[in-house]
Image (cartoon, helix red, strand yellow):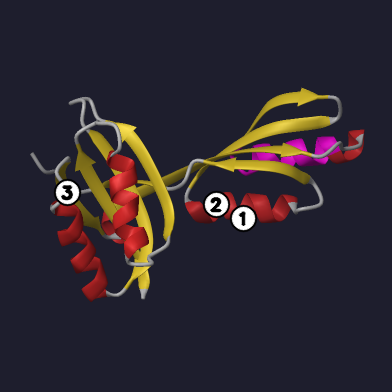
Amino acid sequence: MRTRIFSVLCENVAGVMMRVSRCFTRRQINMDSITVGIEPSGLARIIILFKADDKMASFMQRVLMRLEPIVEVQMLEPENSVAREICLFKTRKLGEEEMSEVIRFIQSAGGKVLEIREGSLIGEIGGSHEEVERLLSSLGTERLKEVARSGQVYLSRNNRE
């Protein structure tokens, strides 16, 4: 089993997310990440990451295509896609020296310090899943108080008209 990426184009109607997730739940497939955005056309694009073998991935693609509000289900390959994730994080209270060290580290990793208040900071990092993981693990659980992640979003490199 390997990680699969579905890009699902669907009508932007109430309940579509529940119907899509129910298809996975019924088959006891855990979704590792699910993100939704509205396209310029008004349709919604759902990006789903899950683990499955080839047979189950093809089956799930067919199952999703049968849902009424679904327009298209595209299976993306990581090597033919661009992926990004955004992460906001809050630190525990830090001393002045440790705060300066953390700020330098965040900036050197391409992140931003959004707010500093009462000895704690809120920062942002965006990049590949691996880059976000690397920054968070480097900061360590002893420094981090709270983390909010967007989930991974993907766009295919292929130009389809």
Q: Which mark is residue 148?
A: none
x, y percent for residue 47? 33, 47
Mark 3 vs mark 2: which is more N-terminal? 3
Using the image, determine if residue 18 lies above or below residue 5: above
Using the image, determine if residue 19 lies above or below residue 55: above
Q: Which residue is mark 1?
A: 134
Amino acid carrying label 1: it is: Arg
* Relative side of 122 to 36, left or right: right
Amino acid carrying label 3: it is: Leu
Is the residue marked by circle 3 packed among few (<14), some (14-19), or many (20+) residues within 10 Å? some
The magenta segment: 99-111
Q: Which mark is residue 67?
A: 3
Pick the residue in front: 108 or 91.
91
Q: Cβ–Cβ below 8 Å for labels 1 and 2?
A: yes
Q: Secondary structure at mark 2?
A: helix
Residue shown at 73% from the left, 50% from the top: 139
Q: Quadrant of residue 46?
A: top left
Is the residue marked by circle 1 packed among few (<14), some (14-19), or many (20+) residues within 10 Å? few
Q: Quadrant of residue 84?
A: top left
Q: Which residue is mark 2?
A: 131
x, y percent for residue 32? 44, 57
Residue shown at 29% from the left, 52% from the top: 81
| Residue farthest along the left direction in this orientation | 161
